[in-house]
Image (cartoon, rainbow, N blue to C red):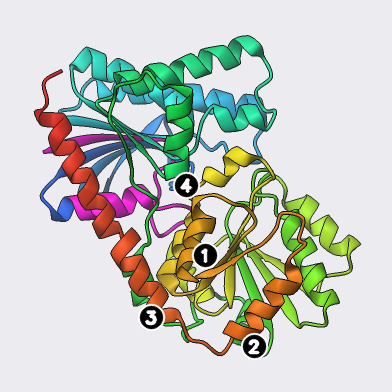
Amino acid sequence: MKVLILHQYFNTPANPGSIRTYDLLDHWKKQGMTATVVTTNYYLNYEFKGLYKKVNILDSEVFVLNTRFNQKSSKISRIAGFLLYVLFSFFVSLFQKFDVLFATSTPITIAIPALLTSLIRQKPLVFEVRDLWPLIPYKLGYLKNKRVVSILFKLEKLTYSKSRHVVFLSTDMMKLSKERYPDIKTPFSVIENMASIDLFEKADANDFSKLKNEELVAILKDRETLKIGYLGTIGFVNNCEYLVLLAEKIKALGVSVKVVIVGDGSEKEDVLDLVKQKNLEDTVVVFEPMAKQNIPTIYKNVNYSISTVRDVPELASNSANKFFDSLAAGTRILINHEGWQAEFINKHNVGFVLKYDLSNVVEFVAYHQQQVEVDATSRIVDLAKTTFSSQVQAAKYMSIFETAASKKS
C-alpha cells in the first residue's frame, strides 16, 4: 500500500517539535507500506533556494515547500504561508501515485488540498484532527469575522463528511465534534498522541553531553530541589505565565524549586518579564528549544513535567506531546485542566492535576513529599508502552488505511 501524507508541519527528531508523523511513518515502513510526504520547511530548516526541495526521509520521498513563517510571524505572513502550502500541496498531490490520502491538521486549511485531491483522484481520504480547528481559535477570539468563521466551520463539516475516516487525538475532541455534527455518518476513531518509546529508551539519564549547557546540567543534577520541566511552545494557548505563578506559590511554602522552561514562542518575552517582575530569576529558568532527540535527558532528570493551557474548556481536549513524552520517560506529569488527561492521571497515579487558580498547590507539595521516594519510572514506562507506544498507534492506522482502501466509495 502507498499513502500520500499531507502534513504542513512534518518534523524529524533532529529538530524541536512534534515527531508524531515521523514515528508513524517509521513503523509503517517496517510493515511494508510506502509513502510520499508533502510538507513545509517550518521545522525541517533546510537551507536551499527555490520554491521547494525533494529530500529522502525514512526511505520516503518528501516534498519540502520553502516557507519560513513561525509563531512570531505576523498574521498576514502566516496566512500567506498557509495559502501557499494549500496550492503547493494540491499541485504536487495531483501527480503522485497512492492508494490512500492521509491529511493531518492543524490548520484546517489542510482540508482544501486534501478534499480536492481526493475528489479529482478518486482516492479515499483519512483525516486526522490534532486540534479542534476552527473551534479553538474561535473560542480564543482569534477568529472574529463572522463570514470567515462560518466558512471555516462549513469546511470542517464538509471535510468530516467527505472523509472515509476521521481520527481524533482524544476522546474529548471526538465527543465535542459529535455533539456539533450529529448527522455526520463518517466513522470516527480516537488514536491519541504517542509515546516515542524507542527514542526515550535509548537515552541515558546520566549522559548530559548533548545538552551543551552548563547551567541546565547543574540544575538537572541537583537531587535536593523540586524540579518541574516545561518543554514546548511558549504561545498564548500554552499560558506559560502559569508556570511563573506556580513557582512563586511553591517557593512561598519554603520549598526549594526550579521550573525549567525549554522552548520559544510568541509569549516568551512576556514570560521573561513576569519572571523579573516576581524576582524569580533563580527559580524559573528559560532555555532555547532543543532537538527532539536531546530532550529525553531533561525529562528523565526532572521530578515532573508540566503541560498547561488557558482556562478555555475546549482546550482540555488537547493531546499535547508533553504528556506522552513524560510517560515515555517514566516521569510524573502535571496539568492545569480537567478532561481525559486528568482522568488518566488520577486513575493511574502518574502525576497531579493542578487547579487553574492554583488553589491546591499545598496539596501538590504534600503529594510530592509522599511520592518523592517512590520510584515509579518502570511502572509509568510500562503504561506508556502498552497504551500509547508509536507501534501500537501505528498499527491502528494501518487497519484504518486498509479498510479505507478496500471500501467502495
As measured in the structure, the alpha-carbon distance from the residue carrying label 2 to the one carrying label 3 is 22 Å
Crowd rating for badge 3 (residues with CA inside 10 Å; few <14, some 14–19, many 20+) = few
Query: Identity of the amino acid at label 2?
Result: Asp
Query: Identity of the amino acid at label 4?
Result: Tyr
Q: In the rendered image, which quarter is residue 73 located in?
A: top right
Image side of residue 160 versus residue 368, left or right: left
Name the residue that disc number 4 marks.
43
Q: In the rendered image, which quarter is residue 365 located in?
A: bottom right
For the residue pair 239 and 85, the one nearer the viewer reads as: 239
Name the residue that disc number 3 marks.
378
Residue range of the region highlighted in magenta in the rendering: 1-28
Earlier sequence position, callout 4 versus callout 2: 4
As measured in the structure, the alpha-carbon distance from the residue carrying label 4 to the one carrying label 2 is 32 Å
Q: Residue furthest top?
A: 147
Query: Identity of the amino acid at label 3?
Result: Ser
Image side of residue 161 versus residue 264, left or right: left
Name the residue that disc number 1 marks.
346
As measured in the structure, the alpha-carbon distance from the residue carrying label 3 to the one carrying label 4 is 32 Å
Q: Does the magenta stretch include residue 22?
A: yes
For the residue pair 47 and 314, the one nearer the viewer reads as: 314
As measured in the structure, the alpha-carbon distance from the residue carrying label 1 to the one carrying label 4 is 34 Å
The image shows residue 310 at horizontal and vertical percentages of 68, 45
Earlier sequence position, callout 2 versus callout 1: 2
Is 354 above or below relative to 89?
A: below
Crowd rating for badge 1 (residues with CA inside 10 Å; few <14, some 14–19, many 20+) = few
Helix, strand or loop for disc 4: loop
Earlier sequence position, callout 1 versus callout 4: 4
Is 341 above or below relative to 130?
A: below
- Which dot marks residue 222? 2
Helix, strand or loop for disc 3: helix
For the residue pair 219 and 243, the one nearer the viewer reads as: 243
